[in-house]
Image: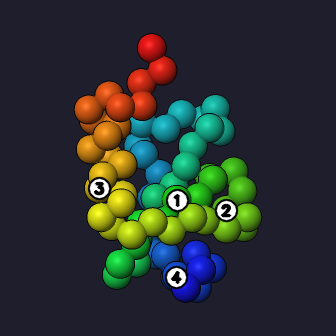
Amino acid sequence: MSNIDIEITNWRKASSSGSGGNCVEVGSSATHVGVRDTKDREAGHIAVPFARWSAFLAGVKAGEFDLS
C-alpha cells in the first residue's frame, strides 16, 4: 500500500506555529500518522505507521536529532 492509498483525516497545525509559513500539519488514519506541508496541501503527504511515528517522537524528545 502506498501513502496515496492511506486516507488521512483530522489534519491539525501546532497552535504555536507562526505566520512565517514554515509549518507542517499532522493528521491520522486508523493505522498511520500523516504529515504534509501547510503551504502546499495539494502536493500530498507522507504516512508513517504509528509505531514508527512514536519512535521518531521519542528520538526528538531524547535529543537524537539536535544539530548542536
13 versus 61 height, above or below? below
Q: Give me the C-alpha separation between circle 1 and circle 4.
A: 12 Å
Nearest the camera: 19 or 31? 31
Task: Choose mark 4 or mark 3, whichever is in front.
Answer: 3
> Mark 2 — residue?
41
- Marks 3 & 1, CB-CB < 8 Å contact: no
Label located before the other in sequence (3 or 1): 1
**Residue 66 in which image quadrant:** top left
Q: Between tags 3 and 1, which lies in front?
A: 3
Residue displayed at 41% across by 43% down: 15
Q: Tag 3, which secondary structure?
A: helix
| Amino acid marked by disc 1 | Val
Image quadrant where residue 3 sits: bottom right
Of marks 2 and 1, which one's residue comes earlier in the chain? 1
Q: Earlier in the sequence, mark 4 or mark 2?
A: 4
Say the numbered circle drawn on residue 35: 1
SS for callout 4: loop
Which residue was labeled with disc 3? 54
Structural distance between the alpha carbons of marks 2 and 1: 10 Å
Q: Residue furthest top?
A: 68
Q: Amino acid at mark 2?
A: Arg
Amino acid type of the residue tagged 4 in the rendering: Glu
**Percent coordinates x, y for residue 59 in the rendering:** 32, 40
Q: Nearer the viewer, mark 3 or mark 2?
A: 3
Residues under numbered marks 4 and 2 in contact, where contact means CB atoms less than 8 Å apart: no
